[in-house]
Image (cartoon, grey):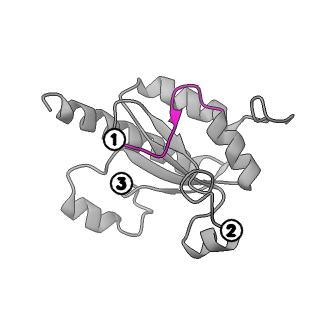
Amino acid sequence: MKTLHLLVQQQTSTALRMAKILEAHPKVAHAYYPGLPSHPEHQLAKRQMTGFGGAVNFVIDGDLIRTIKFVDAPKIPCIAPSFGGCESIVDQPAMISYWDLSQSDRIKYGMKDNLVRFSFGVEDFEDLNDDVLQALETKQIVGLCDG
């Protein structure tokens, strides 16, 4: 608890910086983060929050397989459905939280196959930035198939 404010401060700072980068990246169809002016609830979030949190959701410009390739490519985050720790976490809800539903059922609940959730930890921003950007350029799923 003594260092919680430092954790939240680092996560929030990194998430906002990464959200801006992701929103502008040509391989990202859309970024969802209340700290972005493009977010539909941005003004409300500004009134109610002192920070916008450490998690960014974004949609890869591609399909289920392209998104699996992205999620598998970063070296820093763990692939897991839990958020809020010191380590960065990435997941693809279609493959982790909603894997047992059909594609049409996932879409009904707003879970696109190419949606990614990224919870930023306390790692160095430049390291995370480089890792995410290289992952967006990945061409193959490590150990699963050829590019």
Magenta region, residue range: 73-83
> What is the residue that sits farthest to the bottom in this orientation?
108
Q: Nearer the viewer, mark 2 or mark 3?
A: 2
Number of dots carrying numbers: 3
Q: Residue at x 40, y 60 (%)?
A: 37
Between 122 and 44, the one lying in front of the other is 122
Residue on which disc 3 sits: 35
> Taking 40 as reference, is 52 above or below it?
above
Comes first in the chain, label 2 or label 3: 3
Q: Residue at x 75, y 49 (%)?
A: 65
- Going by the numbered disc 2, the residue's amino acid type is Ser
Q: Residue at x 57, y 34 (%)?
A: 132
Residue on which disc 1 sits: 84
Comes first in the chain, label 1 or label 2: 1
Residue on which disc 2 sits: 102
Cα distance between the residues tagged 3 and 1: 18 Å
What predominant SS class does the magenta segment belong to?
loop
Cα distance between the residues tagged 1 and 2: 29 Å
Residue 141 drawn at (x, y percent): 76, 35
